[in-house]
Amino acid sequence: MKTKLFRNIGYLLFILLALSSCVNEMDMVEDEQGLETLSSRTSPPFAGYEEWVKKLIDYDKSADSKSYLGKVENFLQSIYRFIPEMRDVVDDLINRGFKFRVAVRHDDERKSWFNPNSSEIGFSGVENLKIENMIHELLHFFAFYSVDEYRKRLYAAREEYEIRVLTDLFMRRDFSTFPYEYQGMKIDHDEYIRYLGWLDKLLKNEVQNMDQFSENFIQFGISRLFWIEDTKIKVADLNGYRPRLLGIIWFYGKIK
């Protein structure tokens, strides 16, 4: 009886070990498959990312701007390579099946734009086909599909200034050698130097108090957006602001 009992126990242990091995192998396969669609903010881009980012472009609907697509591809590749936070943005949009068409045509009112109705990212002439404008409009693209109140076209001033601050942070940190005009504050404004100091504190992760952050955001936002207020962007909408897009993209994992 004891011999039979030990034999049965042995068979049971063998089966459990075999099942465990199968599970581990399945996990490894899933991890390998996931490399194609997922990247980490802390890891370098995976091999083949140059082709991966092109999945964002709707080539069929961008035929009118065919001669500019190579430059757009280069921008996407540089953004993905050098800005860890934007890897998450690009991955999320691609994994959800979103694409944008590229448009390059003159517009007297805007340097660049994102039109959610046609899923179009546009640039007003080749002179405005710049990496900072690509970052800016990609963030609008992401915000539309990720932040409920922005998708509903509420608080346009908050969305616009969050995107200006994020673009400034990325350009100041990751493309500091590029000639660049900061979007969050005009260079001739009295608050310009203090604004740059605030960006540096954010880059050094020295801003941990969200109440203080929101207060500074509102102050700087009013100073900048006052000059571009229109029927959509209302400076008063900054009142009561709490991080939304910045919370998802910038502060994720940084608040102690």
Image (spheres, grey):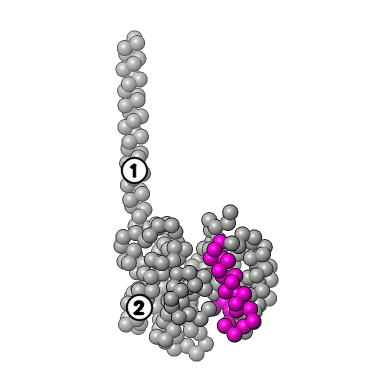
Residue at position x 60%, y 74% from top? 195
Per the image, the residue denoted by label 2 is 71
Residue at position x 53%, y 65% from top? 203
Write the start and end of the magenta stretch as one range. Answer: 183-205
Crowd class of label 2 (few under 14; some 14 to 19; many from 20; radius 10 Å): few
Looking at the image, residue 202 lies above or below residue 40: below
Q: Which mark is residue 26?
A: 1
Residue at position x 34%, y 9% from top? 1
The alpha-carbon separation of the residues under discs 1 and 2 comes to 40 Å
Sequence order check, earlier mark of 1 and 2: 1
Most extreme residue toward the top, as rendered?
A: 1
Indicate left or right for 133 with 198 as reference. left
Residue type at mark 1 is Met
Give the x, y percent position of residue 124: 45, 85
Total number of numbered labels?
Answer: 2
Name the element at disc 1. Answer: helix
Looking at the image, residue 27 lies above or below residue 14: below
